């Protein structure tokens, strides 16, 4: 991503996007390490969150494909509205994901279960790309909303396939791990 622009607003937005991405990554790491105090009893509603997260990811996958369709048809208004919807849903997903991983015990894929290697490979690529795509998404949104179309296209060339991969693999990861979630 080229940040050597003359526009001070672009430089500021790049810094903001990186700061947000770092804060989100640190929050996820802290929650994964169970550093923050958790409630003693996991509320029943928390066990619904992984299913909600998978639904949101699946919905975002569909929205991203529809958005791609509309931009190919040069319908910028629909493209923008659908992407904003996907972005808002992704923000809701992030809050739900963070909440679940703060409150609930981690569910592990059993070492003797079939397809463990495939699961871990998909999960690793999903996590790495999810961490890396956020600044790309934020910058592409900024450049799209400010109608810096050429710069938007340069970022989206990378952001779109990664974001789509992350949403699709989010559903796959859920489907693979869901039989091992605690029953409530």
Image (spheres, rainbow, N blue to C red):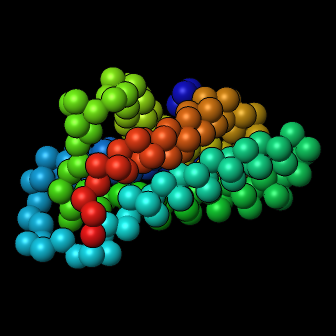
Give the answer, above or below, for where 98 lies relative to 43.
Answer: above
Q: Is residue 112 left or right of residue 24?
A: left
Please state, as top left, top right, bottom left or bottom right, where the C terminus lies in the image.
bottom left
Q: Is residue 14 left or right of residue 131?
A: right
Q: Residue sitting at 53 percent across and 58 percent down?
A: 55
- Residue at x-position 46% and y-position 63%: 52
Residue at 82% across / 58% down in the picture?
78
Q: Position of residue 56 (x, y in %)?
A: 53, 58
Give the quarter of the figure containing the N terminus. Answer: top right
**Which residue is more in the foreground, 133 or 108?**
108
Q: Nearer the viewer, residue 75 or 147?
A: 75
x, y percent for residue 112: 22, 30
Relative to 151, residue 80 above or below: below
Mark yes or no: residue 184 visible. Answer: yes
Question: Is 184 or 104 nearer to us in this picture?
Answer: 184
Residue 156 falls in image quadrant: top right
Counting from the top left corner in percent of width and height, residue 136 is at 53, 38
Viewer can see residue 134:
no
Tell me residue 129's x, y (percent): 44, 33
């Amino acid at each position: 991503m080229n940040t050597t622009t003359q526009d001070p607003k672009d430089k500021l937005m790049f810094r903001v996007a990186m700061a947000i991405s770092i804060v989100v990554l640190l929050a996820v790491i802290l929650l994964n390490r169970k550093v923050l105090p958790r409630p003693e009893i996991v509320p029943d509603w928390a066990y619904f969150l992984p299913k909600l997260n998978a639904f949101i990811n699946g919905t975002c996958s569909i929205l991203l494909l529809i958005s791609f369709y509309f931009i190919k048809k040069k319908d910028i208004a629909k493209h923008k509205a659908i992407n904003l919807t996907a972005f808002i849903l992704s923000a809701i997903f992030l809050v739900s994901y963070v909440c679940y991983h703060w409150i609930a015990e981690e569910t592990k894929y059993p070492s003797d279960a079939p397809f463990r290697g495939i699961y871990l490979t998909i999960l690793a690529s999903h996590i790495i790309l999810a961490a890396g795509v956020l600044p790309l998404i934020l910058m592409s949104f900024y450049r799209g909303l400010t109608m810096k179309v050429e710069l938007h296209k340069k970022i989206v060339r990378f952001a779109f396939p990664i974001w789509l991969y992350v949403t699709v693999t989010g559903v796959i990861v859920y489907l693979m791990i869901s039989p091992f979630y605690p029953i409530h």
